[in-house]
Image: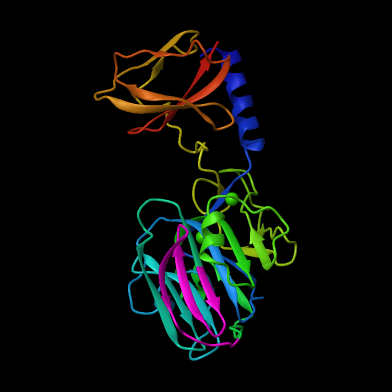
């Protein structure tokens, strides 16, 4: 690599870091990361979240033994609630009726899920996974569950049980959303205004995988109930604002590896030396978007003639990422 390319590379890496794409989700480390919002729920409410659970949950019989998605628990008997992951399934504790409604559908399976609980005064509790009714109980109560003035996102905070999870969206309604309403809106962002919606978090803030030391307030789209981040790293690939299609810039190891891209720079084809097996690869542009993918061994050439000139990143499954220049 000549000096001009090295300089261009450093400049582009810097610009990638500072002008990267806006995040779409927040990673919770499962150790101590938590967000506090105010508990403004009425006697009837619906809680929704779009989540990917990353570690196995605690086991037990009741929701307060789990790791909280949305937790407003207090110690001992109280008019409180906790919506948690227990036995890798949904669970909801209603403190006024002392009933735990436990789900049947496994959430910890490597996939994103839309999860919801409807607590309807004098009717009962329903759990939904991806818009499908998971389980329900007739835990009739009309008491407002506000013994705890806060709701904690990502933790059973009173018991130090934290959820290792990616969260992309949270919604709180003071209405009983129907199964049809939940299913219809399970994979899209809401268009505002919405009747009964009292808090709405899109998690579309911060720079994906960047330095987000100042991004410590979770924005409520309604402007009424912003959250406060606590104990997040706010830099790097975990415990930070992230996007699903972002290549982690900490993940480079091209200097010390025997596996190398050549020729580099190149105008038509690139190869990778010293690969011992066939591997899948992905090529990303400087904005972090994947633009090409396939499989490769040490004899296959990747055609890059269609790429516009500039810096690219190539990621193999077994080793860290490389960068190369199309000229
Ligand atoms: Ca989002
Ligand atoms: Ca932390």
Left or right relative to 100: residue 40: right
Q: Using the image, determine if residue 268 lies above or below residue 73.
A: above
User: Could you tell me which residue is drawn at 34 percent across and 28 percent down?
Assistant: 280
Q: In the image, residue 69 lies at what x, y percent?
A: 50, 67
Left or right relative to 75: residue 90: left
**Residue 129 counted in the magenta span:** yes
Viewer-side residue, 247 vs 175: 175
The single residue placed furthest to the left in the displayed view is: 276
Left or right relative to 280: residue 53: right
Tell me the magenta residue range.
117-143
Q: In the image, residue 204 lies at what x, y percent?
A: 63, 49
Viewer-side residue, 192 vs 51: 192
Q: Quadrant of the C terminus?
A: top right
The single residue placed furthest to the front in the displayed view is: 180
The single residue placed furthest to the bottom in the displayed view is: 77
Residue 152 showing in the rendered view = yes
Q: In the image, residue 138 lies at what x, y percent?
A: 45, 83
Q: Using the image, determine if residue 242 lies above or below residue 298.
A: below
**Residue 101 counted in the magenta span:** no
Left or right relative to 43: residue 272: left
Q: Using the image, determine if residue 282 lies above or below residue 142.
A: above
């Amino acid at each position: 690599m000549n000096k001009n390319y090295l300089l261009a590379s450093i400049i582009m890496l810097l610009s990638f870091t500072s002008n990267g794409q806006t995040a779409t989700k927040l990673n919770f480390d499962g150790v101590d990361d938590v967000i506090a919002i105010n508990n403004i729920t009425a006697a009837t409410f619906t809680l929704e979240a779009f989540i990917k659970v990353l570690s196995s949950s605690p086991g037990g019989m009741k929701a307060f033994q789990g790791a909280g998605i949305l937790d407003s628990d207090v110690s001992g008997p109280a008019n409180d609630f906790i919506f948690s992951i227990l036995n890798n399934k949904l669970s909801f504790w209603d403190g006024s009726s002392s009933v735990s409604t436990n789900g049947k559908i496994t959430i910890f399976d490597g996939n994103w899920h839309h999860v919801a609980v409807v607590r309807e005064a004098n009717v009962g509790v329903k759990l939904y996974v991806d818009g499908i009714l998971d389980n329900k109980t007739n835990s009739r109560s009309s008491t407002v569950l506000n013994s705890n003035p806060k709701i904690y996102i990502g933790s059973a905070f009173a018991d130090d049980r934290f959820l290792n999870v990616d969260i992309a969206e949270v919604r709180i309604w003071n209405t009983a959303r129907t199964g049809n309403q939940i299913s219809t809106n399970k994979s899209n962002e809401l268009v505002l205004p919405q009747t009964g919606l009292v808090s709405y978090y899109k998690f579309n803030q911060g720079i994906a995988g960047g330095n987000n030391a100042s991004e410590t307030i979770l924005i409520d789209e309604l402007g009424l109930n912003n959250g406060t981040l606590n104990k997040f790293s706010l830099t790097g690939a975990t415990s930070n604002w992230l996007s699903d299609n972002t290549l982690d810039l900490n993940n480079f190891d091209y200097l010390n590896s025997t596996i190398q891209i050549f020729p580099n720079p190149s105008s038509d084809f690139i190869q990778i030396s010293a690969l011992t097996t066939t591997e899948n690869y992905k090529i990303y542009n400087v904005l972090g978007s994947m633009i090409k993918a396939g499989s490769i061994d040490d004899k296959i050439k990747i055609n890059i003639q269609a790429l516009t000139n500039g810096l690219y990143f190539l990621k193999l499954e077994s080793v860290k990422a490389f960068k190369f220049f199309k000229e």
